[in-house]
Image (cartoon, rainbow, N blue to C red):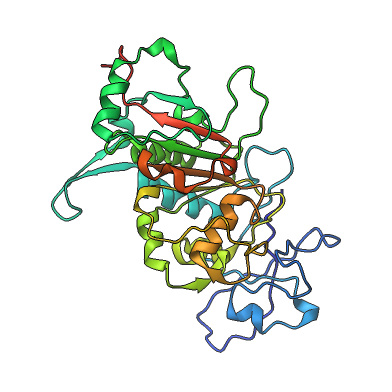
Amino acid sequence: MNFNFSPVRQKRSEPESCFVSMKSDMSVIQPFSFKSGDTQPCLSPVQQRRSEAESSCVSMKSDSSVIQPLDFKSGDTQPCLSHDVFNIFRSNLMKKFECLYEGTSMQGKTTLLNEIYTELYITESESGEINNEHEVRQIETQSRRTATEDTPIKCNDIFRPLPGQDKAIRTVLTKGVAGIGKTVSVQKFILDWAEGKENQDVQLIFPLPFREINLMKNKKLSLLDLLNFFFSETKEMTISCVECKALFIFDGLDECRLSLDFQSNVRLCDVSESASVAVLLMNLIVGNLLPSALIWITSRPAAADLIPSECVHRVTEVRGFSEPQK
């Protein structure tokens, strides 16, 4: 799996700008292209000004005087690192999710997640099984269940089949009543990945809470534009839609203010093609965009049916703590 960064020769009027050129050692391999046609995807104005003869190059600006290529190879569980961009990306996720915030951001206190986290009791539900009872009623029902009724799934294992299962799991919908720990589970999953502890076969994680995506609902942009908006580091890399194993996490489906019309015939397969954010998300969840990517959606039970059951490969339920933990 390859993330290739290669040089761009530029004439700069600002002498203080520091650009490092890199020449790819894979001259017979063209850079990854998301376009189904002949048009080259452009991630920056610099690339738009490039001639066809230099279209295989991407410019990189770095504070480092020596930059090694970030190269994902098939079968690798870790990227061939020592590359600033990926390290910064993972470091930023670590800083963002290593603490729990209590109260408001201005007046509240912070606590390290790793110091207080307790594994939640998560089980697998039948695909498409939606409980429309009032949330208080659901809590009462869950409290009467015994731990022997279901097989628990660790948060870090939600994309791994249970013993005896051989199905591939691409899209997971995790439901649970308000305040039971869905978001904290997401936070811990991301932190463990960023710290290099779990799920190292996943090469990139993009957490995109619906609360933040709602702010973009009137925008028309490409998936690359959306990622560049939330993750500035992605401006420095290209993502292979075939080979890169990325995970998109959409937390809080119940807070979604987008019109997710899964009956729409708008098919989007090009990550550089612009569309509404609702169309982008719908095609990403269905698998038209980045079919190799993993999708994790969390929701309160009442909103879980916004995603058609045929688009979900596993439904899990957060039930709080097991009886021994209580």
Q: Nearer the viewer, residue 167 or 41?
A: 167
The residue lying toward the viewer, choosing from 102 and 28, is 102
Q: Looking at this rendering, what residue extends furthest in the right direction?
A: 28
Residue 78 visible at all: yes
Asked if 211 appears above or below 126 in the picture, the reply is below
- Which residue does the image show at 81% across and 58% down from the upper left? 26
Q: Is residue 26 left or right of residue 163?
A: right
The answer to whether residue 65 is visible is no
Q: Quadrant of the C terminus?
A: top left
Q: Position of residue 11 (x, y in %)?
A: 64, 86
In the displayed structure, 150 sits above or below 139; it is: above
x, y (%) of residue 217?
42, 67
Direction from residue 177 to residue 248 in the image, left or right: right
Reply above or below: 234 against 43.
above
The x, y position of residue 127, in whole percent, is 53, 32
The residue under the point 46% across, 73% down is 219
In the displayed structure image, the side of residue 39 where residue 221 appears, left or right: left
Snapshot quadrant of residue 18: bottom right
Q: Residue furthest left?
A: 107
Residue 320 left/right relative to 208: left
Q: Nearer the viewer, residue 269 or 80?
A: 269
Report x, y in % for residue 175.
40, 36
Numbered label tally: 0
Q: Residue at x 17, y 52 (%)?
A: 104
